[in-house]
Image: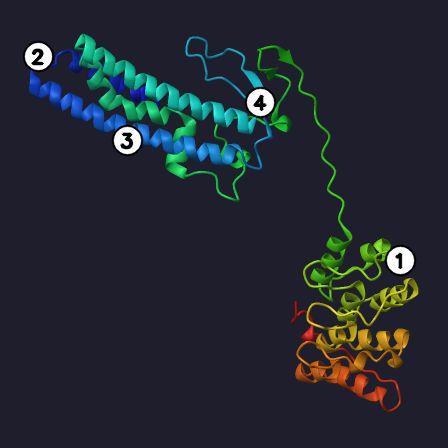
Amino acid sequence: MASTKLMIMLPLMFAARKLDGDDPSIVFMLRCSYGIVQFFILLSVIHVYLCVQRFANGKYKDNIIYVAPPPNPLDPDAKKQYKKTTFGEHASSTARSLVTSTIFGICMTTGLHLYKGMIVGLAMQSVMGPFSLFEKKLAKAILLQGSMKEEDTPKSRRFFDEKYLEELDSKDEIVDGQGQVIVAKKEKAAKPAKKTFEDILLDTWDSGEEKVDFTALLNALNKSNVNYKTKENGWTPLMIAAGLGGAKKSGVVIKKLKELGANASIVDGDGWNALHWAAFHGSVKGAECLLENFGSAAGLQDVKDKEGKTPVEHATAEKNHDVVKVLEAISDAGAGGGLADKDGLRKRK
Protein backbone atom coordinates (compact mmCIF):
# COMPACT_ATOMS: atom_id res chain seq x y z
CA MET A 1 0.00 0.00 0.00
CA ALA A 2 2.83 2.41 0.91
CA SER A 3 4.71 1.83 -2.35
CA THR A 4 1.51 2.26 -4.40
CA LYS A 5 0.74 5.49 -2.59
CA LEU A 6 4.25 6.80 -3.23
CA MET A 7 4.05 5.97 -6.94
CA ILE A 8 0.84 8.01 -7.20
CA MET A 9 1.87 10.84 -4.91
CA LEU A 10 5.16 11.84 -6.56
CA PRO A 11 3.77 12.37 -10.10
CA LEU A 12 0.71 14.03 -8.57
CA MET A 13 2.86 16.55 -6.71
CA PHE A 14 4.65 17.59 -9.89
CA ALA A 15 1.38 17.82 -11.82
CA ALA A 16 -0.31 19.85 -9.07
CA ARG A 17 2.46 22.44 -9.11
CA LYS A 18 1.73 23.14 -12.76
CA LEU A 19 -1.93 23.98 -12.12
CA ASP A 20 -2.84 27.61 -12.75
CA GLY A 21 -4.10 28.99 -9.47
CA ASP A 22 -5.31 32.15 -11.15
CA ASP A 23 -7.74 30.32 -13.43
CA PRO A 24 -11.20 30.53 -11.78
CA SER A 25 -12.50 27.44 -13.60
CA ILE A 26 -9.57 25.30 -12.37
CA VAL A 27 -9.97 26.60 -8.83
CA PHE A 28 -13.71 25.89 -8.94
CA MET A 29 -13.21 22.32 -10.16
CA LEU A 30 -10.56 21.69 -7.51
CA ARG A 31 -12.84 23.01 -4.79
CA CYS A 32 -15.72 20.83 -5.99
CA SER A 33 -13.62 17.69 -6.23
CA TYR A 34 -11.99 18.32 -2.85
CA GLY A 35 -15.34 19.05 -1.20
CA ILE A 36 -17.02 15.93 -2.60
CA VAL A 37 -14.12 13.62 -1.70
CA GLN A 38 -13.76 14.99 1.82
CA PHE A 39 -17.53 14.86 2.38
CA PHE A 40 -17.59 11.11 1.69
CA ILE A 41 -14.41 10.58 3.70
CA LEU A 42 -15.94 12.39 6.67
CA LEU A 43 -19.14 10.31 6.39
CA SER A 44 -17.04 7.14 6.28
CA VAL A 45 -15.05 8.18 9.34
CA ILE A 46 -18.22 8.95 11.30
CA HIS A 47 -19.63 5.56 10.30
CA VAL A 48 -16.45 3.87 11.54
CA TYR A 49 -16.60 5.81 14.81
CA LEU A 50 -20.22 4.84 15.49
CA CYS A 51 -19.53 1.17 14.72
CA VAL A 52 -16.52 1.18 17.03
CA GLN A 53 -18.47 2.76 19.89
CA ARG A 54 -21.01 -0.06 19.70
CA PHE A 55 -18.55 -2.92 20.06
CA ALA A 56 -15.92 -1.09 22.13
CA ASN A 57 -18.41 -0.94 25.00
CA GLY A 58 -19.64 -4.49 24.49
CA LYS A 59 -18.74 -7.82 26.05
CA TYR A 60 -15.12 -7.71 24.88
CA LYS A 61 -14.31 -4.23 26.20
CA ASP A 62 -12.14 -5.54 29.07
CA ASN A 63 -10.16 -8.06 27.00
CA ILE A 64 -6.42 -7.45 27.43
CA ILE A 65 -4.52 -6.90 24.18
CA TYR A 66 -0.94 -5.97 23.33
CA VAL A 67 -0.55 -3.43 20.53
CA ALA A 68 2.67 -2.43 18.75
CA PRO A 69 3.19 0.99 17.12
CA PRO A 70 3.45 1.20 13.31
CA PRO A 71 6.88 0.15 11.99
CA ASN A 72 9.48 2.89 11.80
CA PRO A 73 10.55 3.29 8.13
CA LEU A 74 13.90 4.74 9.29
CA ASP A 75 14.62 1.74 11.49
CA PRO A 76 12.71 -1.30 10.20
CA ASP A 77 14.69 -3.64 12.49
CA ALA A 78 13.77 -1.77 15.67
CA LYS A 79 12.46 -3.98 18.46
CA LYS A 80 8.71 -3.76 18.81
CA GLN A 81 7.36 -2.54 22.12
CA TYR A 82 3.89 -3.88 22.74
CA LYS A 83 1.64 -1.64 24.80
CA LYS A 84 -0.66 -3.42 27.22
CA THR A 85 -4.21 -2.07 27.02
CA THR A 86 -7.82 -3.19 26.81
CA PHE A 87 -9.68 -3.81 23.57
CA GLY A 88 -12.44 -1.33 24.40
CA GLU A 89 -10.08 1.48 25.41
CA HIS A 90 -7.80 1.07 22.39
CA ALA A 91 -10.69 0.80 19.93
CA SER A 92 -12.34 3.95 21.30
CA SER A 93 -9.12 6.00 21.33
CA THR A 94 -8.21 4.87 17.79
CA ALA A 95 -11.67 5.81 16.49
CA ARG A 96 -11.53 9.23 18.19
CA SER A 97 -8.07 9.83 16.77
CA LEU A 98 -9.33 8.99 13.28
CA VAL A 99 -12.17 11.49 13.52
CA THR A 100 -9.92 14.20 15.00
CA SER A 101 -7.15 13.80 12.42
CA THR A 102 -9.66 13.81 9.54
CA ILE A 103 -11.36 17.01 10.70
CA PHE A 104 -8.00 18.65 11.44
CA GLY A 105 -6.71 17.77 7.96
CA ILE A 106 -9.81 19.20 6.28
CA CYS A 107 -9.57 22.41 8.31
CA MET A 108 -5.87 22.85 7.61
CA THR A 109 -6.13 22.25 3.86
CA THR A 110 -9.20 24.50 3.59
CA GLY A 111 -7.54 27.23 5.69
CA LEU A 112 -4.36 27.25 3.60
CA HIS A 113 -6.43 27.50 0.45
CA LEU A 114 -8.71 30.30 1.66
CA TYR A 115 -6.06 32.42 3.35
CA LYS A 116 -2.98 31.63 1.29
CA GLY A 117 -4.56 30.68 -2.03
CA MET A 118 -2.81 27.30 -2.09
CA ILE A 119 -4.41 24.84 -4.49
CA VAL A 120 -1.80 22.08 -4.37
CA GLY A 121 -3.31 20.76 -1.16
CA LEU A 122 -6.77 20.60 -2.73
CA ALA A 123 -5.45 18.63 -5.69
CA MET A 124 -3.36 16.29 -3.56
CA GLN A 125 -6.09 15.52 -1.04
CA SER A 126 -8.72 15.03 -3.74
CA VAL A 127 -6.73 12.04 -4.93
CA MET A 128 -4.77 10.92 -1.87
CA GLY A 129 -7.57 11.30 0.70
CA PRO A 130 -9.09 7.84 0.10
CA PHE A 131 -5.63 6.25 0.11
CA SER A 132 -4.85 7.86 3.46
CA LEU A 133 -8.17 6.65 4.89
CA PHE A 134 -7.60 3.05 3.82
CA GLU A 135 -4.13 3.13 5.34
CA LYS A 136 -5.91 3.06 8.68
CA LYS A 137 -6.42 -0.63 9.43
CA LEU A 138 -9.46 -0.04 11.64
CA ALA A 139 -11.22 2.07 8.99
CA LYS A 140 -10.34 -0.35 6.21
CA ALA A 141 -11.59 -3.37 8.17
CA ILE A 142 -14.95 -1.82 9.01
CA LEU A 143 -15.56 -0.18 5.62
CA LEU A 144 -14.74 -3.34 3.67
CA GLN A 145 -15.82 -6.12 6.06
CA GLY A 146 -18.43 -4.42 8.21
CA SER A 147 -18.68 -3.98 11.95
CA MET A 148 -18.28 -6.82 14.45
CA LYS A 149 -21.03 -9.40 14.20
CA GLU A 150 -22.40 -11.52 17.02
CA GLU A 151 -20.12 -14.43 16.14
CA ASP A 152 -17.01 -12.24 15.78
CA THR A 153 -14.36 -11.77 18.46
CA PRO A 154 -11.46 -9.28 18.68
CA LYS A 155 -9.09 -12.15 17.98
CA SER A 156 -10.96 -13.16 14.82
CA ARG A 157 -10.96 -9.61 13.42
CA ARG A 158 -7.51 -8.34 14.52
CA PHE A 159 -8.31 -4.67 13.96
CA PHE A 160 -4.93 -3.53 15.30
CA ASP A 161 -2.59 -6.46 14.49
CA GLU A 162 -2.58 -6.97 18.22
CA LYS A 163 -1.19 -9.89 20.15
CA TYR A 164 -2.68 -11.77 23.09
CA LEU A 165 -0.96 -12.99 26.21
CA GLU A 166 -0.54 -16.55 25.00
CA GLU A 167 1.01 -15.28 21.74
CA LEU A 168 3.80 -13.22 23.33
CA ASP A 169 7.31 -14.63 23.31
CA SER A 170 10.57 -13.78 25.05
CA LYS A 171 11.56 -11.32 22.31
CA ASP A 172 8.50 -9.13 22.79
CA GLU A 173 8.97 -6.12 25.05
CA ILE A 174 5.88 -5.04 26.95
CA VAL A 175 5.29 -1.46 28.10
CA ASP A 176 2.49 0.16 30.06
CA GLY A 177 0.62 3.37 29.20
CA GLN A 178 3.56 5.49 30.45
CA GLY A 179 6.08 3.57 28.37
CA GLN A 180 7.56 1.70 31.33
CA VAL A 181 8.74 -1.81 30.56
CA ILE A 182 6.70 -4.45 32.37
CA VAL A 183 6.80 -8.21 32.56
CA ALA A 184 3.74 -9.97 31.19
CA LYS A 185 2.93 -12.83 33.52
CA LYS A 186 1.16 -15.83 32.12
CA GLU A 187 -2.29 -15.79 33.61
CA LYS A 188 -3.82 -18.93 34.94
CA ALA A 189 -6.56 -20.34 32.80
CA ALA A 190 -9.91 -19.33 34.15
CA LYS A 191 -11.76 -22.12 35.86
CA PRO A 192 -14.93 -23.13 34.08
CA ALA A 193 -18.03 -21.78 35.76
CA LYS A 194 -19.64 -24.25 38.12
CA LYS A 195 -22.85 -25.64 36.70
CA THR A 196 -26.06 -24.95 38.53
CA PHE A 197 -28.40 -27.78 39.42
CA GLU A 198 -30.76 -26.60 36.69
CA ASP A 199 -27.92 -26.78 34.15
CA ILE A 200 -27.16 -30.35 35.23
CA LEU A 201 -30.82 -31.26 35.00
CA LEU A 202 -31.29 -29.82 31.51
CA ASP A 203 -27.98 -31.24 30.24
CA THR A 204 -29.10 -34.67 31.42
CA TRP A 205 -32.31 -34.40 29.42
CA ASP A 206 -30.58 -32.96 26.35
CA SER A 207 -28.17 -35.93 26.25
CA GLY A 208 -30.98 -38.24 25.12
CA GLU A 209 -31.79 -41.78 26.20
CA GLU A 210 -28.97 -43.49 24.31
CA LYS A 211 -26.12 -41.21 25.45
CA VAL A 212 -27.29 -39.99 28.84
CA ASP A 213 -24.97 -40.27 31.82
CA PHE A 214 -26.76 -39.84 35.14
CA THR A 215 -23.52 -39.52 37.14
CA ALA A 216 -23.56 -35.72 37.43
CA LEU A 217 -27.23 -35.72 38.42
CA LEU A 218 -26.78 -38.50 40.98
CA ASN A 219 -23.84 -36.64 42.56
CA ALA A 220 -25.78 -33.37 42.70
CA LEU A 221 -29.01 -34.76 44.16
CA ASN A 222 -29.85 -34.07 47.79
CA LYS A 223 -32.93 -33.52 49.93
CA SER A 224 -33.00 -29.79 49.21
CA ASN A 225 -33.23 -30.14 45.44
CA VAL A 226 -35.02 -33.45 45.03
CA ASN A 227 -38.22 -31.62 44.07
CA TYR A 228 -36.52 -28.78 42.20
CA LYS A 229 -38.56 -27.35 39.28
CA THR A 230 -36.88 -25.72 36.28
CA LYS A 231 -37.62 -22.03 35.96
CA GLU A 232 -39.15 -22.07 32.50
CA ASN A 233 -41.22 -25.26 32.34
CA GLY A 234 -41.34 -26.65 35.86
CA TRP A 235 -39.52 -29.92 35.12
CA THR A 236 -38.37 -32.02 38.09
CA PRO A 237 -35.58 -34.62 38.38
CA LEU A 238 -38.21 -37.35 38.67
CA MET A 239 -39.90 -36.32 35.41
CA ILE A 240 -36.60 -36.37 33.52
CA ALA A 241 -35.56 -39.73 34.99
CA ALA A 242 -38.97 -41.18 34.06
CA GLY A 243 -38.81 -39.73 30.54
CA LEU A 244 -35.37 -41.34 30.06
CA GLY A 245 -36.54 -44.61 31.57
CA GLY A 246 -34.93 -46.76 28.89
CA ALA A 247 -31.43 -45.53 29.78
CA LYS A 248 -29.04 -47.33 32.13
CA LYS A 249 -29.30 -46.31 35.79
CA SER A 250 -32.67 -44.59 35.28
CA GLY A 251 -34.11 -47.01 37.80
CA VAL A 252 -31.29 -46.19 40.22
CA VAL A 253 -32.04 -42.49 39.87
CA ILE A 254 -35.79 -42.98 40.48
CA LYS A 255 -35.08 -45.13 43.54
CA LYS A 256 -32.69 -42.53 44.97
CA LEU A 257 -35.23 -39.79 44.32
CA LYS A 258 -37.79 -41.80 46.28
CA GLU A 259 -35.34 -42.22 49.17
CA LEU A 260 -34.60 -38.48 49.23
CA GLY A 261 -38.31 -37.64 49.41
CA ALA A 262 -39.34 -36.94 45.82
CA ASN A 263 -42.96 -35.96 45.35
CA ALA A 264 -44.40 -37.84 42.34
CA SER A 265 -47.59 -35.79 42.31
CA ILE A 266 -45.82 -32.56 41.21
CA VAL A 267 -46.83 -31.43 37.71
CA ASP A 268 -44.98 -29.26 35.21
CA GLY A 269 -46.21 -26.26 33.24
CA ASP A 270 -48.39 -28.49 31.04
CA GLY A 271 -49.94 -30.31 33.99
CA TRP A 272 -47.87 -33.45 33.39
CA ASN A 273 -46.61 -35.57 36.27
CA ALA A 274 -43.68 -38.00 35.99
CA LEU A 275 -45.96 -40.80 34.71
CA HIS A 276 -47.17 -38.54 31.88
CA TRP A 277 -43.52 -38.15 30.88
CA ALA A 278 -42.91 -41.90 30.90
CA ALA A 279 -46.12 -42.53 28.98
CA PHE A 280 -45.48 -39.94 26.28
CA HIS A 281 -41.86 -40.94 25.72
CA GLY A 282 -42.53 -44.66 25.63
CA SER A 283 -40.49 -45.34 28.78
CA VAL A 284 -41.76 -48.71 29.97
CA LYS A 285 -39.02 -49.02 32.56
CA GLY A 286 -39.72 -45.49 33.74
CA ALA A 287 -43.42 -46.26 34.20
CA GLU A 288 -42.65 -49.52 35.98
CA CYS A 289 -40.11 -47.91 38.32
CA LEU A 290 -42.51 -45.11 39.18
CA LEU A 291 -45.29 -47.54 40.05
CA GLU A 292 -42.90 -49.83 41.90
CA ASN A 293 -41.44 -47.04 44.05
CA PHE A 294 -44.46 -44.79 44.47
CA GLY A 295 -47.27 -47.35 44.02
CA SER A 296 -50.45 -47.24 41.99
CA ALA A 297 -52.21 -45.99 45.10
CA ALA A 298 -50.53 -42.60 44.48
CA GLY A 299 -53.07 -42.16 41.69
CA LEU A 300 -50.52 -40.92 39.13
CA GLN A 301 -52.30 -42.83 36.37
CA ASP A 302 -55.56 -40.95 36.99
CA VAL A 303 -54.16 -37.40 36.85
CA LYS A 304 -55.34 -35.31 33.91
CA ASP A 305 -53.12 -32.62 32.39
CA LYS A 306 -54.24 -29.19 31.18
CA GLU A 307 -55.65 -30.81 28.03
CA GLY A 308 -57.63 -33.28 30.12
CA LYS A 309 -55.48 -36.28 29.18
CA THR A 310 -54.27 -39.05 31.48
CA PRO A 311 -50.92 -40.84 31.06
CA VAL A 312 -52.55 -43.83 29.33
CA GLU A 313 -54.25 -41.51 26.82
CA HIS A 314 -50.88 -39.99 25.92
CA ALA A 315 -49.30 -43.42 25.60
CA THR A 316 -52.15 -44.53 23.33
CA ALA A 317 -51.93 -41.41 21.16
CA GLU A 318 -48.17 -41.90 20.73
CA LYS A 319 -48.67 -45.63 20.02
CA ASN A 320 -46.47 -46.59 22.95
CA HIS A 321 -48.32 -49.87 23.34
CA ASP A 322 -45.97 -51.44 25.91
CA VAL A 323 -46.55 -48.51 28.26
CA VAL A 324 -50.30 -48.81 27.67
CA LYS A 325 -50.12 -52.47 28.77
CA VAL A 326 -48.29 -51.48 31.95
CA LEU A 327 -50.83 -48.81 32.85
CA GLU A 328 -53.87 -50.90 31.97
CA ALA A 329 -52.53 -53.79 34.03
CA ILE A 330 -52.68 -51.60 37.15
CA SER A 331 -56.42 -52.04 37.37
CA ASP A 332 -56.08 -55.82 36.92
CA ALA A 333 -52.97 -57.42 38.38
CA GLY A 334 -51.07 -54.23 39.40
CA ALA A 335 -48.08 -55.15 37.24
CA GLY A 336 -46.94 -55.13 33.62
CA GLY A 337 -43.92 -55.11 31.41
CA GLY A 338 -42.50 -54.90 27.98
CA LEU A 339 -39.82 -53.20 26.01
CA ALA A 340 -39.77 -49.45 25.66
CA ASP A 341 -40.79 -47.95 22.38
CA LYS A 342 -37.89 -45.55 21.99
CA ASP A 343 -39.40 -43.80 18.99
CA GLY A 344 -41.42 -41.60 21.34
CA LEU A 345 -38.36 -40.23 23.14
CA ARG A 346 -37.70 -36.47 22.96
CA LYS A 347 -40.81 -35.68 20.90
CA ARG A 348 -41.77 -33.30 23.63
CA LYS A 349 -39.94 -30.34 25.12
Compute the Cα span from label 2 to label 3. Answer: 28 Å
Q: Of the two numbered discs 3 and 4 on the same chain, state the one appearing first in sequence.
A: 3
- Residue 224 locus on image (x, y percent): 86, 56
- Residue 187 locus on image (x, y percent): 71, 27
Q: Amino acid at mark 1?
A: Lys
In the picture of the structure, the residue carrying the numbered disc 1 is: 223
In the picture of the structure, the residue carrying the numbered disc 3 is: 40
Residue at 51% over, 32% down: 56
Q: Of the two numbered discs 1 and 4 on the same chain, state the one appearing first in sequence.
A: 4
On screen, residue 304 above or below 258: below
The quadrant of the image that shows the C terminus is: bottom right
Q: Of the two numbered discs 2 and 3 on the same chain, state the one appearing first in sequence.
A: 2
Name the mark nearer the viewer: 1 or 4.
1
For residue 22, the mark is 2
Q: Residues within 10 Å of mark 3 (few under 14, many from 20)?
A: few
Q: Amino acid at mark 4?
A: Thr
Compute the Cα span from label 3 to label 4. Answer: 32 Å
Q: Do labels 2 and 3 touch, CB within 8 Å? A: no
Among the 4 quarters of the image, the one containing residue 342: bottom right
Q: Amino acid at mark 2?
A: Asp
Q: Of the two numbered discs 2 and 4 on the same chain, state the one appearing first in sequence.
A: 2
Left or right placement of residue 7 versus residue 25 in this view = right
Mark 4 secondary-structure assignment: strand
Left or right placement of residue 15 versus residue 86 in this view = left
Name the mark nearer the viewer: 3 or 1.
1
For residue 85, the mark is 4
The quadrant of the image that shows the N terminus is: top left
On screen, residue 314 above or below 117: below
Q: Do labels 2 and 4 touch, CB within 8 Å? A: no
Mark 2 secondary-structure assignment: loop
Q: Residues within 10 Å of mark 4 (few under 14, many from 20)?
A: some
